[in-house]
Amino acid sequence: MSILSINGLHKNFGAAKIIQGIDLNIEEGEFHAVIGPNGAGKSTLFNLISGQFSPSAGEVTLHGQRISGLRPYQINRRGLSRSFQVSNIFAQMNVFENLRCALMWSSGVGYCFWRRAARSGDIDARAHALMDEIGLTARGTDMAGNLSYAEQRALEVGMTIAGGASVLLFDEPTAGMNHHEVETFATFLKKIAEGRTVMMVEHDMNVVFSLADRISVLVYGQIIATGKPEDIRADPAVREAYLGADA
Amino acid sequence: MDTFIFVLVNGLLYGMLLFMLSSGLTLIFSLMGVLNFAHASFYMLGAYFAYQLSSFGSFWLGLILAPLLVGVLGAAIERFGLRVVHKHGHVAELLFTFGLAYLIEELVRLIWGRQPVPYRIPESLDFTLFTVSGIDYSAYRAFMLLIAVAMFVAVLLLLKRTRVGLMVQAALSHPDVLWAMGHNVPRLFMLVFGGGVALAGLAGVIGGNYLVTEPGMAQQMGTILFVIVVFGGLGSLLGAFLASLIIGIAQTLMVTMDTTLSDLVAALGGTAPNATGMFREIWTIAPSNLAPVFPYLLLVILLIVRPRGLLGTRDS
Amino acid sequence: MKRTLIILAALVALGAALTLPYLGAGRFVIVLLTQLAIMVTFAMSYNVNLGQTGLLSFGHAVYLGAGVFSSLYLITAIGAGHVALPLEMVPLGGAFAGFTLAAILGLVSVRRAGVIFAMISLGLAELAVAAAMLFPSVFGGEQGVSTDRMVDFSLTGLGYGRPQEIYMLVLVWAVISVAAMVYLSRTPLGRLANAVRDNPQRVEYLGYAPYWIRYIQFCIAGTFAGLAGSLFALTYEIANASVLGIHMSANVLIATYLGGITYVLGPVVGALMVTLLEINLSRLTEAWLFYYGLLFIAIILFAPRGITGLLVDAPGAFRRAGISGMVTTLARWVPVVGLIGGGTVILVELCYHVSNSFDPREPLTLFWTPVSAQNWAPWITGAVMMVAGLGLFALNRRNAAPRRPQTGDAS
Amino acid sequence: MTLKSILAATVATGLLSSAAIADTIRIAHIDPFSGAFSNVGAVNGKHVQFGADVVNGAGGVLDGDTLEIVRFDNKLSAQETVIAFQEALDQGIRIITQATSSGVALALADAVQKYNRRNPDDPVLYLNYGSADPSLTRDKCDYFMFRFEAHSGMKQAAATDLIAQDDSIKKVYIIGQDYGHGHEVSRYTKEMLAEKRPDIEIVGDEFHPFGSVKDFTPYVAKILSSGADAVVTGNFGSDLTLLIKAANSAGLSAKFFTQYAGTFGTPTAIGDAGKGRVYDAAPWHPDVPVEQNNEASAQMAKDFETKYDSDLYYVQIVVQMQMLGEAINAAGSAEPAAVAAALENMSFDGPTGPMQMRASDHQLFHPLFVSVFTDDGITNDSEDTGLGWKTLLKVDADQVSDDSTCQVEKP
């Protein structure tokens, strides 16, 4: 059974129909990329899955349970975590604190106000381990707002995976990076994705085709094709609608 | 019935006075995100400037010059104060205007003393216009209404017909647009702030002699303006207009209602409970006692059920 | 190193606070110290909302008031023998009252932060004040509710009639409260509150509901405000509805902000400063409110992180600048501050003297010199100082500009 | 730096507590001398100072000792009042005077009472120069507290005497601020009119919010439609002037019976709007010396005007200082216990006639004048408005009625 499945999803903003009937199944362990031109509704799709918006029609199920209509934090607790296109971190807190906050729910500390955070289970050890994993150990005590762009992206991904979610949504993880940074970051993403189910929106086709197991093409709120990278590359409809001459 | 009409007309007048204050505040708030705590202080300055000018020349001199002076002062405060604080965020901006209100009040006390000043209605307008069943309606009140309507029309024309007005309108519904369009946003802010407080100044000119011109007048007007702005909805001049009228008329009408809870019980055939113990006053509170808190009650309820306000175009 | 210094300073301050009453300090100093302790507790509780969670409240005094009135009634009930609670434990009752009210009003308040929250808090505060005025049977109207704290039932056996005794009690509770709130900032909830303050959306994607984080913090803030209210009730033994008014809420906001909301102990600094200013500056000059307003605006304009921010940054800045740099900076700015400050004081005092003093014809003492406000000389002196200071200021700004690139107006 | 120096100054004031100077008798005057109500404090301050000067100018007390006024700013806050009280105690002052705001007065009375109970060997004397709230000499009456001006009930008794004499009055409308004083005025008016003129119909009994009504027109419309030919109000300040202005503008021709229309600022604010129809019940107005042909009191009023460039409003403050001086002389010491004993049953020949302190509740009885605001036959106008007050009814001290049954307890 699919770990994440989207059935007949619609979303309207007033008269504007942004998502017009999407059906998609993501299998466990899969790395699934969503591509499409600007304004195709990719970010809206992510916002629908992750709970930012609730759908006008249709539903999303995670592990077979309906999650559409739930609040983002409820969806997150069920094992789905996302990153943001624009770095969405706690700028006034240091890197270590950022990660520690991301780890709290999964460490089971809840809304605890009677124990010090540092004494709450193995949360500090886990934060250090995570900091190692994303390569930010050296900057642990620096204010997150002062990090370089690429470092902020790494932190963003680190916070996304911190809670141990089984399904991850990455919204344009390499947006705004230079060529060299993109290469390093793609390797990093590949490592992160191991053992997890990933859904990713991405503009950089090199990254998409090197990482994705399957690709969906979203145009005007509808998926016009889903398949293995080579099939998508070969699909005439996709070529016409999206990839154009440069593919 | 005549009394009712009189009270209604009076509520309308009060509502229009409130609107003269809240229109500027809502523009400033919607455009700049600054809830100007000092807005009523500019109203007070308008009254004091007009008093000073009318003691030099005539009331009409004050009517024209005082709002201009207030506007220039407001623009200067925006340029050299608010703009500096802007980068520290909205809380800092809000607190800046909060401190400003404080300072203006002390400044007024410093210059004009602690007593009310004798700012009087001009003799040419000090007569009875008409009488409805024994209640006089003074010419000055009609004049106030006239000024308020004229101001409303002028602001509307300004917004609909001029380039600056169109920019402001665009910014009200989509605050990010202006930056994207590369307009001189800081200058626009300065203009709107100056213009907004000038409107408050005008309200002070015509309200100061109708009511009392004293250092406490800003605080008295005070927070009710925020209620109107938030209640009317962010970015909506029309909302502010409706809210001003609703609050003006409702407050005025409530004053005439004397039915208490025990009256109500008696009217329903029950016996009024013997009022003893704590909270016994609940039986004897009439709507007229609640008139001043009514706006706040409305505000809290509205914000809970509809945080964007009456006609708000967006959440804050 | 830094930590030890802070702890050392805290211990010294505590030691001083404890011993002062026995060094022959008068009643005034003791009542002042008691008031300081109350304000510190209150400001700390305010910052649980503002600094830690990003909730700007204009109605925090409502929760203080809950503590005040419940404690007044509680003390009376203890005195009458209806409640078997030692006097020392009264603050628990105030804390409970503050908590209960916050738990009820919080449900509708904290759905949104920012301006909406601020406006709801303002509306609720106005309603609370109005309600208090409408129910003299509970709040005592103008004359308020009074009680007598000498109830013959205490743990220590003290009568608490003397100011020193009540001061000790207040101090103990204040220290416990401040410690608890500092501790709170280190707990998971405290950290999450900071996260909600910075970015509530992100928190929601980390499995937490920002609403509940705000709500719990709000309740905690209300609890300690209620406790502070209890201390108030114990000290003054009387209160009317004005304790829960806007003035009290504005005061704690100003104190907290001046102290520096980004520092855990910022409110302590702010509350100490504002209370001392309010009580002492008003004894120096009648224009104190004016200076107070100026100071507040100056802090917002030039030191957004408050007094604590200045104190924390100062050593580093001195180290960086070196001796010569410091001398240049001082040489550049001391005249400016001196001239503008001196000019302002001269003009303001003259204005006050003319418009508000008992007798404007009498000479007033300005900087230890008697001058007559009827003369032009002092006015011209003040104006010249002011203009010169502003000119120097502009000059300095221009000179400093290349080294300190202007940041854009955009945020 | 500032913090430290202020703290140092604070501690110093505390330590200097016992440095009282022998040949002056110091009296603490606690009032709002800064902030929104500083106008009230300033005017009261002038009168208190003037009263002391009168006593000192007449040779002082005892063997040439002088009265010295020490002012403390309470910002019209109850807890600041308590702090100021402690400071006054520190400075060795044992005579306190205050009256502005009944809430503050009751808080101070409470603090003084508690202090006296806890320090029976070192009592403090509280002289109230004119709080309106009857309860100070009713349920709150106290051996060490004296009130030197008629409370609102006594003034209302005088006002209703005049109403009773006026046959043109058939319908009375009562309107007042929704707090203690306003309710007392309403209660008294109803009780006394029922007794003195049972044929008069009370056509309205209205309470409006205190200090927050901007436009009284709706209230005036109600009065108009009730057909009242007299309005009775206890309002003061802007609540009074706005009411009269609104009445004038709506063409309401009813008579207004007030208690505070003659005091500072109000005649100016009312102006012609009140001509011939505002009545005031008060212990004094500028034409009292002329009507009584009293040279001495005319001179006193003139001295005040020369000195402060303002009308003398509160003659009872001067009376208070004079009576204090006599009591100190009679007691042969300025010790509160002795002075209180001397004051307790004192008769005094005041500037407006004979006065008597009632021993049972320490309320002073003095002549009251019910007068009308007019420009007809006025010698001294009020605040240079061209209008002044003309006495229609004088009630001598022994005719003033008050039904207090309070009995002070001798310590």
Image: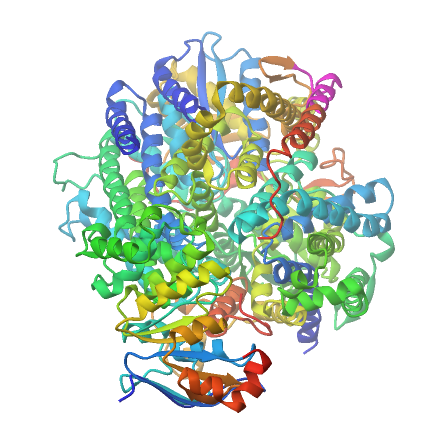
- Note whether D2 is above or below B104 in the view shown: above
Q: Nearer the viewer, residue D282 or D263?
A: D263
Rendering coords of residue D8 (x, y %): 39, 20
Residue D294 in view (yes/no) = yes
Magenta span: C371-385
Q: Left or right: C185 with respect to D108?
A: left
Q: Nearer the viewer, residue D8 or D257?
A: D8
Q: Left or right: C309 with respect to B46?
A: left
Rendering coords of residue D371 (x, y %): 66, 43
Position of the N terminus of chain B, as image quadrant, is bottom right
Residue under the image location 66 percent in, 43 percent down: D266
Q: Nearer the viewer, residue D42 or C270?
A: C270
Rendering coords of residue B37 (x, y %): 58, 52
Residue under the image location 72 percent in, 36 percent down: D383
A211 magenta-colored: no
Q: Nearer the viewer, residue A29 or B230?
A: A29
- Note whether B18 is above or below C255 in the view shown: below
